[in-house]
């Protein structure tokens, strides 16, 4: 008898953002006369940089000429993009990352979810709490999570990220259990989704030292690195000495340059990173060669144009606009007397629901009374209960209107 992967059945309910969309659609259908403002799902609203569009047009024309046509590309991406990434993303930070350590992908989400393919199902996992749901769900599907009860998986170590620790966990925050053995895989995200907190070099150094000491691997999501505004904060984990022997880094053009629908990102797997007698670079290359045919040449040319003079100027303008939205949202919520975090080094604002309300309870109230779509903090993990996440990726006029509506119901 045919059997299915029962880990899919173990996942509770819908994916967080699917549930948010379902409730928003229900509200919209019930009240078609009321305009919804969507500050929930972190999709961008500004168009692709013109430089990227022109580059993709030119690349598409190449495909119509036998002399310049390209079929299958390299599994790890074209050299022109990998070299541009190193020149513009890592060299200025003093990192020793090489083009040959970069894998171009269709986005950070895919690689964050797929990286588990190269690790045993027996590996133990630690995640921040609250956390981007993909980190947890991907490990559930891989059979690493154990049993689900009271909002937690038994084989996943949850590291509470609270106001008390600045929403940045330390190794000492790892829960006791499993004979106090160190987790094999440690997911970190900075700037963090959903809290907006950004780790310092000193905070990341604690994790790098810990991982090297215990043989763990850090899976570092740096998708929001370009939103860091405060000086001295690291944009890459490879700014930390020793990270090349313990960390894999995931990055994205989605929020940086509006590629949420166009899909392009990259993952760094250092050649020096070895575990279990194998070089993880070789394992990931084998995985990509087996399951992935590479990112489109046309898309990679568009991504390369992000680093052109015109492209870089447009990208700076878009990021500046989103950060200004974040400032307006943050200041508006603070003026309403709410407890607010994030929005400085991140496009996400994290605030506590007033009056001790639960996340979904206040989410529904904001949706039904203010017609504003948000994301409930409880959907990111147990420690997110009682919080709401807002995104600054909307239009400025919508951000201003949303804050006005929220204030009106408080």
Image (cartoon, rainbow, N blue to C red):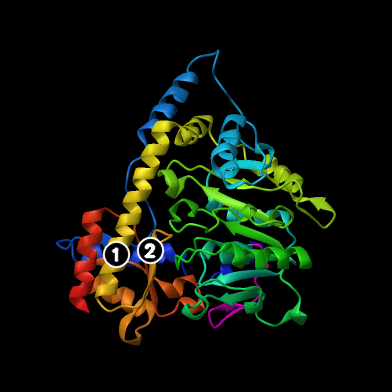
**Which is nearer the eye, 243 or 56?**
243
Which dot marks residue 343? 2
Mark 2 residue element = loop
Give the label on residue 329, or none: 1
For the point 47% across and 78% down, which residue is it?
163
Residue 213: percent from left, percent from top: 78, 67
Residue stretch in magenta: 142-153
Please tell me which residue lies in front, 10 or 179: 179
Q: Position of residue 31 (x, y in %)?
A: 18, 65
Asked if residue 184 shows in the view, the reply is no
| C-alpha separation, residue under disc 1 versus residue under disc 2 | 8 Å
Q: Is residue 237 above or below residue 388?
A: above
- What's the residue at 27%, 76% (across, down)? 365
Which residue is painted at 25% across and 54% down in the image?
Answer: 396
Residue occupying the far left of the picture? 33
Element type at mark 1: helix
Relative to 293, is 166 on the left or the right?
A: left
Q: Quadrant of residue 97?
A: top right
User: Can you give x and y, in whole percent of width and height, for residue 52 in the image?
Assistant: 41, 33
């Amino acid at each position: 008898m045919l059997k299915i992967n029962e880990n899919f059945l173990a996942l509770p309910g819908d994916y967080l953002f699917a549930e948010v969309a379902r409730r928003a659609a229900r509200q919209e259908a019930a009240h078609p006369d009321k305009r919804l403002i969507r500050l929930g799902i972190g999709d961008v609203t500004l168009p692709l940089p013109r430089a990227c569009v022109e580059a993709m047009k030119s690349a598409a024309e190449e495909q119509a000429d036998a002399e310049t046509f390209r079929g299958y590309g390299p599994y790890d991406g074209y050299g022109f993009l990998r070299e541009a990434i190193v020149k513009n993303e890592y060299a200025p930070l003093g990192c020793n990352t090489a083009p040959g350590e970069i894998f171009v992908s269709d986005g950070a989400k895919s690689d964050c979810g797929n990286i588990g393919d190269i690790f045993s199902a027996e590996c133990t996992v630690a995640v921040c709490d609250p956390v981007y749901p993909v980190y947890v769900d991907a490990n559930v599907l891989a059979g690493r999570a154990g049993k689900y009860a009271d909002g937690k998986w038994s084989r996943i170590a949850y590291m509470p990220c609270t106001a008390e620790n600045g929403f940045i966990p330390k190794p000492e925050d790892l829960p006791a259990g499993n004979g106090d053995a160190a987790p094999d895989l440690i997911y970190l995200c900075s700037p963090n989704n959903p809290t907006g907190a950004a780790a310092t070099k000193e905070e990341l150094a604690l994790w790098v030292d810990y991982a090297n000491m215990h043989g763990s691997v850090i899976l570092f999501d740096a998708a929001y690195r370009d939103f860091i505004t405060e000086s001295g904060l690291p944009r890459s984990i490879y700014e930390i000495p020793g990270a090349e022997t313990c960390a894999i880094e995931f990055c994205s053009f989605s929020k940086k340059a509006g590629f949420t629908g166009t899909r392009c990102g990259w993952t760094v797997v250092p050649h020096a990173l070895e575990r279990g007698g194998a070089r993880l670079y070789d394992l990931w290359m084998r995985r990509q060669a087996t399951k992935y045919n590479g990112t489109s040449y046309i898309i990679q040319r568009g991504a390369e144009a992000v680093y052109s003079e015109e492209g870089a100027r447009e990208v700076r303008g878009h990021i500046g606009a989103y950060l200004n939205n974040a400032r307006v949202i943050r200041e508006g919520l603070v003026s309403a007397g709410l407890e607010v975090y994030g929005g400085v080094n991140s496009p996400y604002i994290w605030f506590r629901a007033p009056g001790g309300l639960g996340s979904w309870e206040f989410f529904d109230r904001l949706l039904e009374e203010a017609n504003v779509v948000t994301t409930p903090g409880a959907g990111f993990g147990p420690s997110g209960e009682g919080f709401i996440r807002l995104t600054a990726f909307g239009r400025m006029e919508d951000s201003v209107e949303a804050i006005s509506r929220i204030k009106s119901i408080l």
